[in-house]
Amino acid sequence: MSLDERIALTLYDRIYQVISGADPHSGMPSAFDTATTMFAMAQRGMVLNAADYRNPWSPGNTDGSIQAAFNIASLVDDIPAVSHMYAPTGRSVSDVYSKMVRTVHVSEPPPSPEIQRQRDELKKVLFERAKDDDGHEIERPTALANAEQQAFNDYQDAYMTYVSQWAAAQDDPNLKKVWPVVGAQALQRPRRAFADWGAAGRDQIASTKAQLATLNEGQVARAFADAQFRLVAYELVNELQETFFRTTISPSDWAGADASGWPQFTFSESTLKSDFSAEATSWGASAQVSVGLWSFGGGVSSSDSRVSMSNDTTGVSLSFRWRVCPVYRKWMDGTLFKLPNWDVGTLTGAGGVSGGPDPLMPLIPQAVVIVRDVHVSANWSHQDSEHLDSAISGSASVGWGPFAVSGNYSHSSTSDRFGAHRTDQGFVIPDIQVLGFVCTKVPPCPPK
């Protein structure tokens, strides 16, 4: 296997290791349910202008930017194809879901008064009715549900940070020697976060949802009606009169300038893997990493041409800071996909929302893998130095492995360009870029 492939597949597997919560000795539940999620990594990262995403508007930050809120919602709205390589389908989560909720036809009798009474009481734990600024009635999470969600966010962040540290220690002989001590200390943060999640109502919320799931009689029409209320509560319009649903990415300062607290990934040629997961191998085949790490033209899921690194390039090393940032859509009710007795007529075609050939929404991005401060160094050959010079000049769209080295900012309304900075040993990419998405697999629906 070539050096190009080993570098690219090691990167995929390291990220996948963190997402799947792979430390077998932590005793902590994974931050993601790997049975219902998959990781889709781009062939080449999407570089963002961080200023476009800072200080988004929210009900608690009314002086914030509506456009930043729109940019965040748009960033995670593309529906990916079912592949370990990220490839947008051209459809959006918000469009498919809102049409599903608003055009649904329910084929069941109404619930009995007693069942409805029990459901109404249980739902008071999760949601409350209120009025928006225009006096419209809306449905929103209760204070308890909000606190429980925030505590879970904190646990996800703490646990993924811990697993990042654990994964780094496995490939560093010096760190591995002291990991029994360092790891025990590092594990205290996710353990505290897990306890805080419990204190914030984890078990009560889970019990309430489980009880609601058992009260199936006549639940479908009410569930879709409630979902319609929730869409209204989170619908906004930006300065260009574009409608969108307010979506958040955690932590709230992910686009901020200070990344000192982000976990760091480092490796050198001596620590590269030689055996890889089936997921990494599948991604590598789709991304054509066997053809070479250098890519020219194209974008996140394709390139005009690829070139392998020269055999004369040696001593490759890489480091970057990264976060796995969960996405929250309070306007979406994921339980709808599993309900019986509903359809949306001809909206979905033969593929359905999910489960059939060419479905509308087989995956929903639920977390963003973001990197920054990418440092690559090596003893570069003359050929690779020329590729690097081409990238640094900013005159071309160039990638190295899954990293974008130069080109136009993604998801930007401007034509501004970014470019790596040359160092004595290689190059640095300071900008934030999205390497991929952790995606929820939508269960087959509508029901047959």
Image: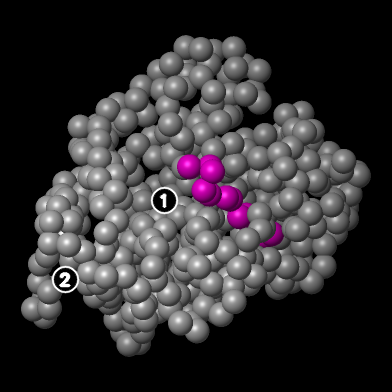
Disc 2 target residue? 138
Alpha carbon distance from label 2 to label 1: 25 Å
Q: In the rendered image, which residue does mark 1 sit on?
A: 326
Nearer to the camera, 188 or 216? 216
Instruction: Name the residue: 17% across, 62% down.
Output: 112
**SS of the residue under disc 1:** strand
Q: Does the magenta stretch include residue 88?
A: no
The answer to whether 413 is drawn above or below residue 31 in the figure is below
Locate residue 160 relative to residue 14 in the image: left or right.
left
Residue 419: quadrant of the picture:
bottom right
Question: Which residue is farthest right?
Answer: 311
Q: Can residue 259 be seen in this view?
A: yes
Nearer to us in this view, 83 or 354: 354
**Boundaries of the magenta span:** 33-44
291 horizontally vs 254: left or right = right
At 51% across and 19% down in the image, what residue appears? 25
Give the x, y percent position of residue 85. 67, 58
x%, y% of residue 262?
45, 40
